[in-house]
Amino acid sequence: MDIVETDRLILRNFRQGDAADLFAYLRQPRSNCFVSLRLADLDAAQAEVETRSRSDEHIAVCLRGVDRLIGDLFCVHEPPDTFSVGWNFNADFGGAGYATEAARALVEYLFTVKQARRLYAYVEEDNVASQRLCERLGMRREGLFREFVSFVTDDDGAPIFENTMQYAILRKEWTARR
């Protein structure tokens, strides 16, 4: 991915040195949808950084000036012109608007550089912060999938299914908002 800079952030590919900061928020993921990404230790974090560094689908979000990883974005291309997007941030940096700033930069990059026609995001029903972020990005709620997916199980090992919302925005909608 091309490096994208905002007033406070740098969006770039993952690289050597990001493991400790990635481990800081993936040792105990806040959202169930990231449970499968849980990292057991720093060695697992280093392996994950290596994997992510080879893909433009995973974008490191770093504080400008100190280049410290505070979260990540993802964008998965679905040919010919659609991307699935999402985000995961270290809670220690919450409430400062970093997720919004990073996601806005990603949306602009995908629409202007990658010429995306449509972006969409899946958000679990209980993840109000991500729902609000989608709305700040101008995305509209397209639907609610009842008991759509299971990320965790109950004490007996039975899957717990979660309701999932789909948000989306078209390039023409994004352009009209600008």
Image (cartoon, rainbow, N blue to C red):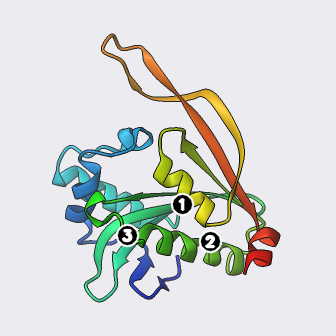
The CA distance from mark 1 to mark 3 is 23 Å
The CA distance from mark 2 to mark 3 is 19 Å
Q: Quadrant of residue 71?
A: bottom left
Q: Looking at the image, which residue is at 49% across and 69% down?
A: 100
The CA distance from mark 2 to mark 1 is 12 Å
Q: Quadrant of residue 89?
A: bottom left
Judge by depth and name the residue closer to the eye, 55 or 105.
Answer: 105
Q: Position of residue 62 (x, y in %)?
A: 35, 76
Instruction: State whether residue 2 is above or below residue 89.
Output: below
Q: Looking at the image, which residue is at 47% across and 45% down?
A: 127
Q: Earlier in the sequence, mark 2 or mark 3?
A: 3
Judge by depth and name the residue closer to the eye, 12 or 121.
Answer: 121
Q: Position of residue 86 (x, y in %)?
A: 53, 56
Marks 1 and 3 in Cβ contact (< 8 Å):
no
Residue annotated with mark 2: 107
Instruction: State whether residue 25 is above or below residue 142.
Output: below
Q: Secondary structure at mark 2?
A: helix
Residue annotated with mark 1: 133
Residue annotated with mark 3: 14
Quadrant holding the C terminus: bottom right
Instruction: State whether residue 88 is above or below residue 163.
Output: below
Q: Position of residue 114 (x, y in %)?
A: 69, 75
Instruction: State whether residue 167 is above or below residue 5.
Output: above
| Type of the residue with mark 3 | Phe
Disc 3 residue crowd, few under 14, some 14–19, many 20+, Cα 10 Å: many
